[in-house]
Structures are given as C-alpha cells and as structure tokens.
Amino acid sequence: RDNLWFSTYGDDGLVCVTLTGDYLTFTTKNGASDDCFREVLELRDGSIVAADRSGGLTFIENYKVTNTITEKETTITSAILTMVQAQDGSIYCGSNGNGIIVIKYGKVIRHITEADGLNSLVVLRIVPYGEDLFYVTSDGIYYDDGENIRLLDNFPYSNNYDIYLSPDGEAWITSSTGLYIVNARSLAQNSNYSATLLNENSGLDTALSAISWNYVDENGNVVVGDEIDRKSVV
C-alpha cells in the first residue's frame, strides 16, 4: 500500500505513515505487545508483523492489531534480529541469543536451537533459497532443507552478516573481512568451490557493518553499509 513503517523506541512505538500522509501509531495502549520495536515484516497477504525489543510479536491487519505473541509464548527473551516468510506461509524469526522460532496461523509451532543443529543461537539473517533457508549466525552459515540443518563448513569465513542471492545464481555474503561472492548452489550443497573476496584491494576501504540493512537498487547494484555510516555500491 506504499506505507512507510518505522520501528521506534519511545512513546509512538510502531509508526505507520500512509501514502496520504496519515500518521498511525501502535503501542500497548491500542493492543501492541510493547512500546519499543525493532523489526517489521509485510506478509504476502498484506498484513504486518512487528517484533518488539524483548521477543514479542504484534500482528496488524487493516491498521488494527489482530494478535500478539508475548516473549513467554515465543520462549525468546532477546531481540528478534531478522524475520522472513517461508514459502509455506510460516514466519521464521531469528533472535539475538535464543535461536529461531517458527510461527504459523498466529501461533508458535517450532523453536530451533542446538538440538536441531545450530551451534550458535545468535541469528543475524534468515535468507530464503527456494523452499529452503540459509541461516547466518555468529559462528557461520547454516542450511535448512526442511529435514536437516547443517553448518556449511566449506565456506572460508565464519564472521558473516548477510546474504544477497542474485538472479544469476550467485550468493553475495557480507562479512567482517569484506564481501564474498560464491555460487549459491555450491554454497548450499557445501561442495568444493572457490570464493571471490572483495576487500580493500577492490575498493572497500572500511569494514562492513553487522547492523546495516543492505539492499539492491533497480540496476542490480548491491548497496552495503559500513561502520562509519557510509554506503558502498558493488
């Protein structure tokens, strides 16, 4: 609907600015799970799910709160860092220390932790790859094919931040040492492959940032944030 959504820490909570300039706020006063938010995701049906500072979730449809899930229900007591909607409609939420929760039909249906194959419970990004998922954690990249979760230990670096999957089959992986480019299928299969590293020798003259949200412009350029609030285009 061409709305702008802002996650704020303060009296306004979650803020929606509509195309006509209307200014809507969602806080505990009108049913939201908290007054401080960190992450917003628009679902395929046009509804909104917002993650608050402590692991709770607020669902919004037609500008009204329709459901909330508290941190007690999610069993997540830290901030949710990333959310995606899988092909089956499930919402995967990666947290800052409590692994991943999976939500469907407004309820928690699964909690992914060490018992499922994650060695790190800090999940920076969840990236869909067809029907499967990549997990970028604090100790490496994992692949979830729906049956097993495995560490992709053939990738040459562990301190990674994000993955962009390009239309031509490449995976662009931001990290503390620069930007890696690998074949996405080879990455998922954990096969033997070569990785191209773009770093200071390629013109990236500062470290990339773990907390930046990167994006791709209309020309296919990947725009990544660095640690001194600049943007690098590659």
Image (cartoon, rainbow, N blue to C red):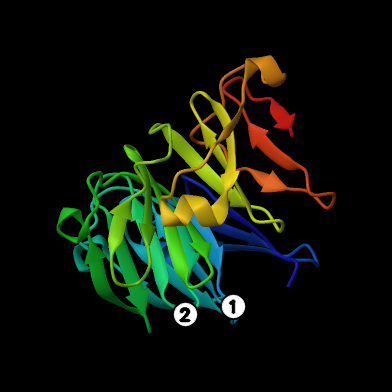
Which quadrant would the N terminus be assigned to in this image? bottom right
The location of residue 8, given as percent across then percent down, is: 52, 47
Place residue 145 in its image quadrant.
bottom left
The location of residue 26, given as percent across then percent down, is: 50, 64
Q: Is residue 202 left or right of residue 187?
A: right
Amino acid type at circle 1 is Arg
Q: Earlier in the sequence, mark 1 or mark 2?
A: 1
Which quadrant would the C terminus be assigned to in this image? top right
The location of residue 68, given as percent across then percent down, is: 36, 72
State the residue lying farthest toward the front.
192
Q: How many marks?
A: 2
Residue drawn 28% across the image and 74% down it: 108
Residue 149 in view (yes/no): yes
Q: Dot 2 surroundings within 10 Å: few (below 14), some, or many (20 or more)?
A: some
Judging depth in this view, the residue of 159 and 65 nearest the camera is 159
Q: CA distance from mark 1 to mark 2?
A: 8 Å
Judging depth in this view, the residue of 190 and 24 nearest the camera is 190
Q: Secondary structure at mark 2?
A: loop
Amino acid type at circle 2 is Gly
Which residue is denoted by mark 2 in the rendering?
89
Q: Secondary structure at mark 1?
A: loop
Residue drawn 50% across the image and 36% down it: 211
Which residue is denoted by mark 1 in the rendering?
44
Residue 13 in view (yes/no): no
Tell me if label 1 and label 2 are in contact, CB under 8 Å.
Answer: yes
